[in-house]
Image (spheres, helix red, strand yellow):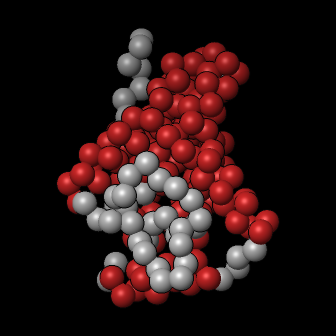
Amino acid sequence: MPQGLDNRLLYAMRTRFHGPRREAFAKGLAFLGEYGWIWLAIGGGMALLDGDHREEWIVAGLLGPFAIGLNYAVKLVVRRPRPVLDGLPPLGGAPSSLSFPSAHSTASFACATAMTRIDSTAAVLFALAALIAIGRPYLGMHYPSDVLAGALLGTAVGLVVPFGVFT
């Protein structure tokens, strides 16, 4: 994505449709996506409910934290700093100053993809993944291209994760 377009999209997402409730919702989603914990919880819950695919659900849930680690390795190579918009500070904090790709997006799309491979009805989890991802530039934490790259990386990871590891 050209940098000018990335900046314009980020500015639009950071200045439009904001209000206390929407910002609180986006911050809540960011909290759920932090370190992939929501995906670990979903995978664990599904492992309890679906004994026939218990190991797969566990692997898919663990994929969240794994994807965060993989994502950080990419961040160390790319070294893109987080966005800075004059007069519009980010509405959240981050464990690193590196932006590309979005770890929230990577983990969310990796897990949603892997979970959909286990049970096609889990495709509804892409809605949660998309909301978590879109919230990142909305909060000023990432450029839109960071989120897109994270979603693509996460989808790829979710497609290649080997199931049957424990069997």
In this view, which residue lies farthest toward the right?
A: 21
Residue 54 versus residue 116 in the image, above or below:
above
Q: Is residue 83 visible?
A: yes
Depicted 55 relative to depicted 111: above or below: above
Q: Nearer the viewer, residue 87 or 106?
A: 87
Q: Residue at x 54, y 44 (%)?
A: 34
Q: Is residue 137 left or right of residue 80?
A: right
Residue 83, how many percent across, how many down?
41, 72
Identified at 38% across, 52% down, the residue is 96
For this orientation, the residue located farthest to the front is: 87
In the shown orientation, is residue 117 left or right of residue 42?
left
Name of the residue lying farthest toward the left: 77
Instruction: Examine the image and state in which quarter residue 120 appears.
Output: top right
Q: Position of residue 55 (x, y in %)?
A: 51, 19
For this rendering, which residue is in front, 33 or 129? 33
Residue 112 in sight from this viewpoint: no
Q: Residue at x 67, y 26 (%)?
A: 45
Q: Image quadrant for the N terminus? A: bottom left
Residue at 36% across, 29% down: 162
Q: Viewer-proximal residue, 79 or 62?
A: 79
Eyeballing the image, is 86 above or below 167? Answer: below
Residue 6 point in image, percent of width and height:
41, 80
Q: How many marks?
A: 0
Q: Split into 4 quadrants, where in the image is the C terminus?
A: top left
Where on the picture, by quarter, is residue 164?
Answer: top left
